[in-house]
Image (tube, grey):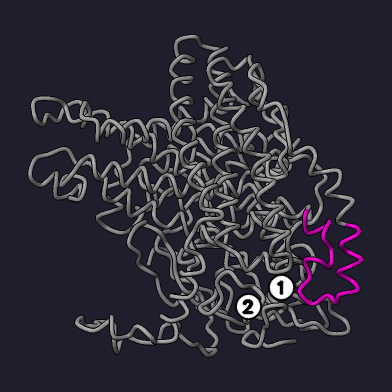
Amino acid sequence: MVAPTEVTEEQARAVAEEARESGWDKPSFAKELFLGRFRLDLVHPFPVPTPDDAARTERFLVKLRDYCDGLDGSVIERDSLIPDDYVRGFAELGCFGLKIPEEYGGLGLSQVAYNRALMLVGSVHASLGALLSAHQSIGVPEPLKLAGTDEQKRKFLPRCAKGAISAFLLTEPDVGSDPARMASTATPVEDGRAYLLDGVKLWTTNGVVAELLVVMARVPRTEGNRGGVSAFVVEADSPGVTVERRNSFMGLRGIENGVTRMHRVRVPAENLIGREGDGLKIALTTLNAGRLAIPALCTASGKWSLKIAREWSAERVQWGRPVGEHGAVASKISFIAATTFALEATLTLSGQMADEGRNDIRIEAALAKLWASEMACTIADELVQIRGGRGYETAESLAARGERAVPAEQMLRDLRINRIFEGSSEIMRLLIAREAVDAHLSAAGDLADPDADLQHKARAALGASGFYAKWLPHLISGKGQLPTSYGEFGSLATHLRFVERNARKLARSTFYGMARWQAGMEKHQSFLGRVVDIGAELFAMSAACVRAEMDRTEDSVRGASAVDLADAFCQQSRLRIDRLFAALWENTDDTDHRVARSVLGGEFTWLEAGVLDQTEGTGPWIASWAPGPSTEANLARRFPTATVEGAASTS
């Protein structure tokens, strides 16, 4: 086995490629969009839950809202800890089993219901949303639902549903988005009846208080073992598992995120999820729907920001008028309102498509996560600006001097992690870009392989010509050029025509990039990132228009407002799209790369003179580790699992 530190770029790429889902058994609206085909029929009419599902959701949300009304998020912010009784209350409501099927003790609610529950919970404090989403979106329940055996589901899911908190352990101190370098190992022992886990996992959300863990570790490849990165369910109180510290962050003050060490931790073979080597594929599949938790929390922040911006801007008077009537502030309020409408439309559309199962939503969910996390941060920043000094002041300080305790700066801090959680924006753009150009790579074959010889490239060129001969003519003209197209959408029809035209333009631009750079395409990450950002905006425009049309047909009063918001959003989005298209070919990418190389080479160290480096002597950039002594002690828990008998007491 290649040691993690010796993994080459080609080997790392091969591991990532092996883990991705390569087939497309179901249609994908976003995939078609990147290929220049605007398949409006895949999202219109706007999908809605069944009446029974809708009724069950509303009944639960009424109870959840009543409970959340009695919680105080400032307590979490002040103490950097979620109170025990808050967690017990969520457990009693069934919040730890929202999506777990009823046959395993869960509530069996839909993805849409789950998203709405996270919005409510997250509006109390973002750490509560992280607690529940880390447990269900990426913790033990989702991987077992997707790839677990019947025995594993019967053994672990009821515990999870009752409140046995779970965590997902993937990241390591020296391994972030490059799983090929994973150092944690799972060595088969006892003639294959068990594995011994060794390694250190970093940023283990819920890991400090978890009772169950999903651990990713590398099984050595031998003659009798398939090997590879594999997923295991691990009891957190197993001998050899140690939580070494609880990490602190700029936001999410109540998050139970730590460093977990495993030293010769025995895990029975029946706790292996799927097969050996399936770990990364299971993780990526889990995230297809799991990523929607972040857009849910981002949408909640948009709604709250709109409320605060409206109330403050109507009440605060400057220069003889409410500040909201001044043009500079009015544009910010319009952006917050229109973008929040689009955030909710994108979230609800993606969630409902996940529930229906008719479409493959891997790109839609990734786009929703990427776009929502970026836009929510902008919304929060604009709210802080609208509030001025009061936006920068903490809620505790505001309350101490008798003003309304508005935690605007806290929201800005809490939201920032969403651009890093579950795939940073940069990694998300590369993942989406890989799916967006999949058809091109399949058609190009060895043309896209930097190691292929000229003979193979020539043969691949002949094959690619057949694909492009059929595909390219469809990108020349379409419904977007007909002034009567999409007429049923009324005033929003012009925006859908824009989406159709620019989907084709985006596909042509991607083709030009492939033709220009061929095997070097993957090196042009800024170009690919802009392609993805354009696709994200087109997806959001589509969702906003389709959602507004549904509202218009169901409720004439609300529908008129929805159409206004969708129209405003689309106008704003179109300007962003135009700028992104212009930047595809007119940019500073080459200059940026040259300057970055010079910086890394130490050429500009003279520019760093004149300041002090207060970080000197505080330790290495990345901490090294060595196996510590085995421990028989159970994990210290910051709060007990309320409904599991014999749980450890609070530390």
Dividing the picture into quadrants, the one containing residue 69 is top left
Placement of the C terminus among the 4 image quadrants: bottom left
Question: What stretch of residues is rendered in magenta?
Answer: 440-463
Residue nearest the viewer, comparing 259 with 368:
368
Q: Would residue 626 be visible to someone looking at this image?
A: yes
Tell me if residue 566 is in the magenta stretch.
no
**On the rendered structure, is 285 left or right of 332?**
right
Placement of the N terminus among the 4 image quadrants: bottom right
Q: Would residue 109 be visible to someone looking at this image?
A: no
Which label's residue is closer to the chain start, 1 or 2? 2
Cβ–Cβ under 8 Å for marks 1 and 2: yes
Q: Name the residue under label 1.
A: 229
Mark 1 closeness class: few <14, some 14–19, many ≥20 residues within 10 Å = many
Q: Name the residue under label 2.
A: 182
Q: Is 67 located above or below residue 631 in the figure?
A: above
Amino acid type at circle 1 is Val
Q: Main secondary structure of the magenta part?
A: helix
**On the rendered structure, is 607 left or right of 103?**
left
